[in-house]
């Protein structure tokens, strides 16, 4: 994954509570089992005038010119609720988003974000609303900065707003690691444990070479 340490970007406000994964990527838009080919279906039910169509609705925030190139999304309470489909995060990531700022997230969605290099940043309802009110004045000029390393969000018109990520999530985002990569950082310790345990309890380690020969 691409590491995420600090980003300054256009932020798009979508301050609706309970935005579920079917709104983020409707099932009809899940035409791929891979992480690619999903960006066009992102928020399809709101982004386009007709179901299954591609006629952009100018009322939707992502179709408005001032929000071109948005990489930060401002959302409402319980963002990412609904099903556990990881496609929702894949679609957001492929579209270009690196940060979702919201008062709260559905737990599975939040975990999927981190595993795909998308930072789920929790700020209070009041703070998200204040940031949104600054952004809408001129989205291209009033960009937000999210510093994962320092744990703060700020703009040219606001004081830094602190946020917290658990240690594992922070490490995965900063270093661009998935859960397996994070575990493999301790490979020397893992190997040392098994070497010592093999000496202490040899009977639980079958001789695989002998078994292969016997077969």
Image: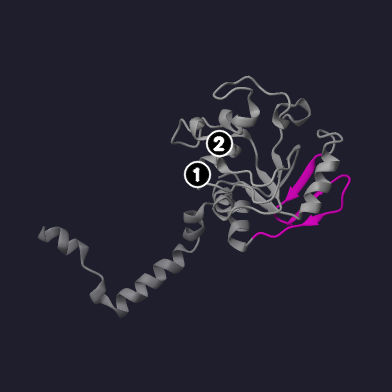
Query: What is the x, y in percent for residue 110?
Result: 59, 52
Between the residue at mark 2 and the residue at mark 1, the CA separation in whole angstroms equals: 9 Å
Q: Is residue 156 covered in magenta?
A: yes
Q: Does the magenta stretch include residue 164?
A: yes
Is 180 on the left-hand or right-hand side of 42?
left
Q: Residue at x 30, y 77 (%)?
A: 199
Q: Quadrant of residue 104?
A: bottom right
- Number of the label disc, if any, that sits on residue 85: 1
Q: Decide which of 15, 41 is in the foreground and name it.
A: 15
Taking depth in this image into account, of 214 and 164 the one nearest to the observer is: 164
Question: Residue 207: x and y, percent?
Answer: 21, 67
In the rendered structure, the answer to whether residue 139 lies left or right of residue 169 reads right
Mark 2 closeness class: few <14, some 14–19, many ≥20 residues within 10 Å: many
**Which residue is located at x 34 percent, y 75 percent?**
197
Q: In which quarter of the image is the N terminus?
A: top right
- What residue sits 83% from the left and 54% below the top? 160
Displayed quadrant of residue 142: top right
Q: In this view, does 38 lie above or below 162?
A: above
For mark 2, what is the residue?
Answer: 25
Q: Where is residue 75 in the image (x, y as percent from the top left)?
A: 70, 45
Residue projecting furthest to the bottom: 200
What segment is highlighted magenta in the picture? 143-165
Can you tell which quarter of the image residue 66 is in? top right
Judge whether residue 153 can be spotted in this image. Answer: no
Using the image, tell me which numbered label, if any, was put on residue 113.
Answer: none
| Disc 1 residue crowd, few under 14, some 14–19, many 20+, Cα 10 Å | some
Secondary structure under tag 1 reads loop
The extreme right residue here reads 157
Left/right of residue 184 with respect to residue 58 in the rendered view: left
Side of 178 where 103 appears, left or right: right
Q: Earlier in the sequence, mark 2 or mark 1?
A: 2
Q: Which of 156 and 66 is in front in this view?
A: 66
């Amino acid at each position: 994954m691409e590491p995420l340490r600090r980003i300054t970007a256009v932020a798009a406000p979508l301050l609706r509570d309970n935005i579920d994964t079917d709104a983020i990527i409707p099932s009809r838009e899940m035409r791929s089992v891979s992480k690619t080919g999903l960006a066009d279906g992102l928020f399809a039910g709101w982004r386009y005038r007709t179901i299954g169509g591609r006629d952009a609705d100018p009322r939707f925030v992502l179709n408005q010119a001032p929000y071109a190139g948005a990489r930060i999304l401002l959302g409402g309470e319980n963002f990412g609720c609904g099903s556990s489909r990881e496609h929702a995060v894949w679609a957001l990531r492929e579209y270009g988003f690196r940060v979702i700022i919201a008062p709260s997230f559905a737990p599975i969605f939040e975990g999927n974000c981190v595993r795909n290099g998308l930072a789920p940043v929790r700020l209070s309802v009041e703070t998200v609303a204040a940031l949104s009110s600054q952004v809408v004045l001129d989205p291209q000029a009033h960009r937000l900065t999210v510093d994962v390393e320092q744990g703060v969000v700020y703009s040219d018109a606001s004081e830094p707003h602190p946020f917290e990520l658990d240690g594992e999530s922070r490490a995965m985002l900063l270093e661009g690691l998935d859960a397996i990569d994070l575990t493999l950082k301790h490979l020397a310790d893992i190997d040392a444990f098994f070497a010592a345990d093999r000496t202490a309890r040899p009977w639980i380690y079958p001789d695989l070479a002998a078994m292969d020969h016997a077969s």
